[in-house]
Amino acid sequence: MNDECIVSQHAGISRADFLRLGGAALLGATEMIPFSSAEEDTPADHADKTSNVWMMPPSYQNGRCIRDLFKSPAQWTETRKLIQGIGYADHCFATQFSDSELKSIFSMINSWGLALGLEVGAVKPWGVTGEATFKAENPMWKRFQSLGAKIAAIGMDEPFCAVRSSIHKPDEYAVNETANFISLVRGGYPDLMVGDIEPYPYFSVQELTNWIDSLQSKLSSMQTKGMDFFRLDVDWVSFNLAGKGSWQDVKTIEQYCRQKGLKFSLIYWASDFPQLQRLGIANDATWYVSVMQQAYDYAMVGGKPDQYMVESWVDGPEKMAHDSGDFTFTRSVRDISRMIARKIS
């Protein structure tokens, strides 16, 4: 999430940009840890997948969480059977892992039959045009492909928010430059699913629906395929603390996306984690309980996203697995898959 949007929305830390800003300091600090050999998952292992659940592990501690998962794949076998794909920020893959590590990671993802998604920039303070951003990121994507990555989808990290809060240009500028970025992506990667991520309630329902309409219309005028999905990053703790926003409004956005032929993706995360961490009372239980509460609350208003993206960009949880352990990251992914997504899909 864009830094200024974070400050305005929930005074937390950035999901992506803070790592990009600090990425140079991480280079050379990568610890070479051999990953386990890929465990083959048979088609029968995935027979109980009935919903589109993805997971995006946290990227703090220089990629330690991904390393933990891929060193011990046997500890999250059940979760793997339930999910559709794994996501990660492109710049984190690029700065946190060596070629040999990435080759092993991508090989294992492929062998498990999971899709790979990247969270990417589109318009940012470091890339104020869609063309500049694409030129900066394209070499990373090519590197990943050369190492065996089969990139299925990209989620643009809040271009509308970046332009409104950081670049301070008119909304039309955000539409034009984001459309330019998508056009370049479509030209170079025609098979990719392309979607946008934006924050709520930083933006109102009306602002978000206007944004979707404007961007899709611009792409149509350019004779470029429109977005495939729209992903919402909800600061749900603001509903009570700031009296701003509601799950019913999120459901309205979901319904609007469906009317426009867009898949609706929702990030499931612990919105209260940054504040509780500053108070010194956040732990792994905070992550698990908060994520599950979000899942219950959205289900209560009839929310049924097309994609459940269980994603942590905060400094937690500490433990990634075992997926039957208490309060681990993969336990939260497993339980949302089994208890929420499969029940209401």
Image (spheres, rainbow, N blue to C red):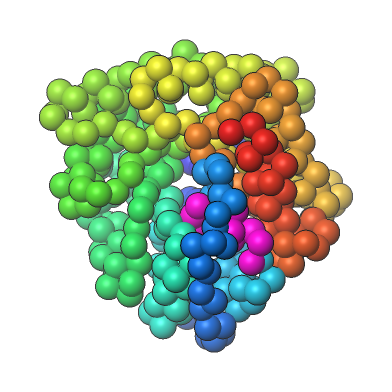
Q: Measuring 51% from the left and 23% from the top, which residue is drawn there?
A: 254
Up/down of 1 relative to 221, above or below: below
Q: Position of residue 62 (x, y in %)?
A: 56, 69
Query: In the rendered view, does 77 fall on the left or right side of 181?
Result: right
Up/down of 286 relative to 74, above or below: above
Toward the right, the furthest residue is: 281
Q: Nearer the viewer, residue 149 or 62?
A: 149
- To which quarter of the image does residue 178 belong? top left
- To which quarter of the image does residue 45 belong? bottom right
Q: Position of residue 330 (x, y in %)?
A: 68, 58
Up/down of 195 relative to 61, above or below: above
Query: In the rendered view, does 215 fall on the left or right side of 82?
Result: left
Q: Position of residue 344 (x, y in %)?
A: 64, 31
Q: Measuring 51% from the left and 74% from the top, which residue is drawn there?
A: 40
Q: Measuring 35% from the left and 53% from the top, which residue is drawn there?
A: 152
Query: In the rendered view, does 248 fall on the left or right side of 24?
Result: right
- To which quarter of the image does residue 125 belong? top left
> Number of marks in the image?
0
Q: Measuring 74% from the left and 67% from the top, which residue is drawn there?
A: 322
Task: Using the rendered image of the protein, determine whether residue 285 is visible from the camera's viewpoint.
Answer: yes
Magenta-drawn stretch contains 82: yes
Magenta-drawn stretch contains 23: no
What stretch of residues is rendered in magenta?
A: 77-88
Q: Nearer the viewer, residue 260 or 34?
A: 260
Up/down of 223 relative to 273, above or below: above
